[in-house]
C-alpha cells in the first residue's frame, strides 16, 4: 500500500532523480522509493552489522552495472529486481524494529514493589 507524502527536495536532487527516472524508465516516485530502500539497508547494516543485508545491495548493483555495460535488464527483470529489493528491505526493516524493541526493553526501568 502506498501513502501519499510531501517531500521537499533540493533542485540538484530533483535533477538527479529525473535523470535516473528517464534512464531506467521508472516514475519519479519509484526512483525515490528505490533510493530510500538502498539507504535504509545500508543504515540497518551499520546499526546491526551482525545481520547480512547484502541482497539489498546486490539487486541495486545488478541493475546499475547491467545498464552501464549496455546490457540492461528487460522491464520484467527490472521489476522483479525492484520487487526483491523491496522484499529484502522490508525484512531488514522488520529486523530493525525487533532489535530496537529489545534495546528499549533493556532501557526501561524496572518497577520496584
Image (cartoon, rainbow, N blue to C red):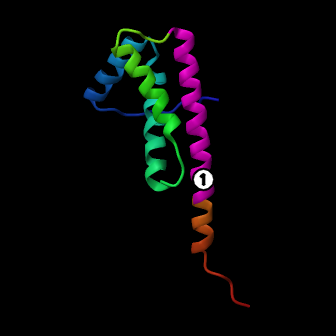
Q: Position of residue 31 (x, y in %)?
A: 44, 24
Name the one closer to the observer, 8 or 72.
72
Q: Position of residue 102 (x, y in %)?
A: 62, 64
Q: Which residue is mark 1?
A: 97
Among the 4 quarters of the image, the one containing residue 69 = top left
Name the one closer to the observer, 93 or 60.
60
Label 1: how many Cα within 10 Å (few below 14, some 14–19, many 20+): few
Residue 3 visible: no
Q: Assess whether residue 30 is covered by the magenta stretch.
A: no
- Please identify the residue farthest to the right as the structure is shown: 113
Q: Is residue 113 left or right of residue 21?
A: right
| Picture residue at 48% right of the left edge, 12% below the top | 73
| The C terminus - image quarter | bottom right
Q: Position of residue 14 (x, y in %)?
A: 32, 25
Q: Is residue 86 left or right of residue 72?
A: right
Q: Magenta residues: mostly which secondary structure? A: helix
Q: Position of residue 78 (x, y in %)?
A: 52, 16
Q: Give the magenta-colored segment's residue range.
A: 74-99
Residue 108 visible: yes
| The N terminus - image quarter | top right
| Picture residue at 62% right of the left edge, 47% below the top | 94
- Please identify the residue farthest to the left as the structure is shown: 12
Q: Is residue 57 left or right of residue 110?
A: left
Position of 43 relative to 112 (above/below) = above
Amino acid at each position: 500500500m502506498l501513502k501519499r507524502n510531501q517531500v521537499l527536495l533540493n533542485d540538484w536532487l530533483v535533477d538527479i532523480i529525473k535523470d535516473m527516472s528517464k534512464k531506467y524508465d521508472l516514475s519519479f516516485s519509484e526512483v525515490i522509493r528505490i533510493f530510500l530502500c538502498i539507504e535504509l539497508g545500508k543504515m540497518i547494516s551499520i546499526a546491526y552489522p551482525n545481520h547480512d543485508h547484502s541482497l539489498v545491495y546486490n539487486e541495486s548493483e545488478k541493475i546499475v552495472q547491467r545498464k552501464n555495460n549496455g546490457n540492461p535488464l528487460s522491464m520484467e527483470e527490472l521489476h522483479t529486481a525492484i520487487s526483491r529489493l523491496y522484499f529484502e528491505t522490508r525484512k531488514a526493516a522488520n529486523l530493525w524494529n525487533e532489535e530496537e524493541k529489545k534495546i528499549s526493553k533493556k532501557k526501561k526501568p524496572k518497577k520496584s514493589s
